[in-house]
Amino acid sequence: MSLRLVSAALLCVAVTVALAWAVLDRPLPEENLPDRVAAAMPESGVDHPVTAVLLNFRSYDTLLEIAVLLLAVVVALALREAQPDQPEAMGLDNPLLRAVMAWLLPLILIVAGFLLWAGSYQPGGAFQAGSVLAAAGVLLRLAGVTTAWLDNATLMRAGLALGLLTFLGVGLLVMIPGAPFLTYPLEYAGTLILVIELTLTLSIGLTLISLFRLTPPYADDPDEAREQAGKTP
Amino acid sequence: MIGLWSVPLLFALPLALGILSLLVTPAWRPRLIFVGLPLLTLASVDVLARLVLEGPRIYELGGWEAPLGINLVVDGLAVGMILMTTLVASLCALYARVYLRDYPASSSFFWPLLWLLWAGMNGIWLAEDIFNLYVGLEVMGLAAVGMVALRATPQALAAAMRYLLAALLGSLAYLLGVALLYATYGTLSMAGLQEAAAPNATTHVALALIILGLLLKTALFPLHAWLPPAHGGALTPVSALLSALVIKGSFYILMRIWLVLGPEVTPIFTAQLLGVLGAGAVFYGGWMAWRQHHLKQLVAYSTVAQIGYLFLFFPLVTGTGPEAARLAWDGTLMMLVAHALAKAALFLSAGNLILAVGSTQISHLVGISRFRPMSLFSFGLAGVSLMGLPPSGGFTGKWLLLHSAILSDQWWWLIVLFLGGLLSAAYIFKVFRMSFREGPQIDRSITPPLTLDVTALILASASILIGLTAHLPLFWLRLGSAFGAG
């Protein structure tokens, strides 16, 4: 075991040294991509370069990344279904927590909406807004609040798929006039990006909430977990 | 304008089908293949027809030119891989529709994962952007891990976890390399890199990270340990998809990046080292395959061995003459395609034999030749290609590699090609010897549905046919590459 540790440590040191060497000895690029982005900004439909890169110039990467998120939930769903036990009713039955939640929830929703809107002219956007939305879902679960629509499997799946489906649909729809995939017409670019971001926010939020909710309840002690698994045939 | 559609449809269609299969009821999920397979076949054939008639081209996504936007490359290599994927994955899907009836719990999520895997693979084949390749790798890798976990037995979950960790480590190393290249050259487009790449420390460290990451994902010896439990333990159609197609994804990226960076940047000793590791894989994988007692484990170790041949590409193409390099390109691609067809056939027919005797043990196959001649025939045909006997695709590939090795005065690779073939023969005949032996163990067998036998047979025959008609596909594969269309 110690031999393994030593070799792992040596490997880490070697990689670190190689990386440091690579970064310090780096020639500067001749190609200036930020300049190109700045030059193309007027045609992007948004005012913030990060959003322009993520949802216009390199929107195809983002599309595939959303597919990765959906995949993660599909795998989680598959694994959850393979385990016969239901998710444990989780949550603290605490009136104070619920009272605080009633104040927090609207605030969280406003923050998520602001982040989404801010994405068009300053740092922000669908991923950030979706994560904030997911935090609200996690809080709801911790407070033991059950919502019918979160437990409705069909509705949940539709919400999970909505973002990718809209993105894909817009990408294909703009091809009708004869343009390549994901080429937004300039006059609609801002609107289309906003629609995509809106649906992405919802789907990303639901993805993160699902991953949290689908995690099987487990005991802290692995031996105890094995005992429990042995008890239920 | 149809030409504009077929290229994005190659990944958009599987993505849409993946989402759709998540939304419909489980009974409808397998039926989506009757819509999806014809459409994807149509799109693939259209892309091939356009390549042959109009030549290779670049597809600018979003109408943005690289390096600002992401381009797709539609050249011979990409189209060849797309057609290979369409053929193998379609037959695996038809097989799975019947096979998964016995696994109702696993089957409902097999279909969304299959379509997303397909989208990821087509994304990789078409990519011209090294970061886009990373995202494609993630889609493909995560779908593949999910498919291994589908069986949900403790062994399957352990294999999937191990696969996930190996795949993640590989992706991260690759991403680190990509980040270094971007920091050095300011572009992610392969065409831009090809122009700018120069031999300096940063590029070499980036190349080392990219190579290591991709070797881990391709499971080249000695980084192969995750492969046999993942491929051998999965559901049969999953094993076939993973062994035939998924490991080719990371090899394909390595091949592209190696050629893009060019001979000034790719050191000859690294090429020789990759060849040596390939030789190690051929010997070790073959030896381990021969020692297995479980049929699918044997086939999985055979994949470890066959990956080795692909890596002879690097020493044969680096620093050798144009003729030797062209032969190495032809030979490697022939080996790659032949292995995809033969390995899918081998896994599917192994699955049929396992269904027939109801056991995964090779020793329980005694006397099966009398009951399941067709399953055994497919297994044998695929075996012929893996052994490299004429007139199979495996033979043609090895023959081309052999010529390349002689032309470039690297006789030592001949030993690998020759002994590797003998080892393959040893493990294939191990199965055959058992099945032709008359023994007391079984006097009956379960008859698997006809679809299962037919799909395996089509794949096995294709692995032979590709060797007989090698000239034309090899000509197409060369279109748009550095090796000319002559």
Image: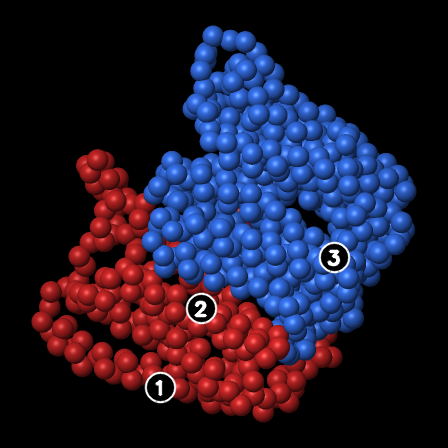
Residue beneath the point at 61% across and 47% down: B87
Compared with residue B52, is residue B384 higher up or lower down, i.e. above or below? Answer: above
Mark sitting earlier along the chain (1/2):
1
The x and y percentages for residue B357 are 46, 22
- Mark identifier at residue B477: none
In the rendered image, which residue does mark 3 sit on? B76
Q: Position of residue A81 (x, y in %)?
A: 31, 48
- Identify which amino acid the numbered label 3 is placed on: Gly
State the residue position of label 2: A164
Q: Are dots 1 and 3 in contact, CB under 8 Å?
A: no
Chain of residue at mark 1: A
The residue under label 1 is which amino acid type?
Answer: Phe
Please rate how many residues cluster around mark 2, counting C-alpha atoms within 10 Å: few if below 14, some from 14 to 19, many from 20. Answer: many
- Chain designation of label 3: B
Measure how far apart labels 1 and 2 are at the Cα level.
22 Å
Marking on residue A114? 1
Image location of residue A51, percent across then percent down: 50, 82
| Frontmost residue, B227 versus B93 | B93
- The colour with which the image depicts chain A is red
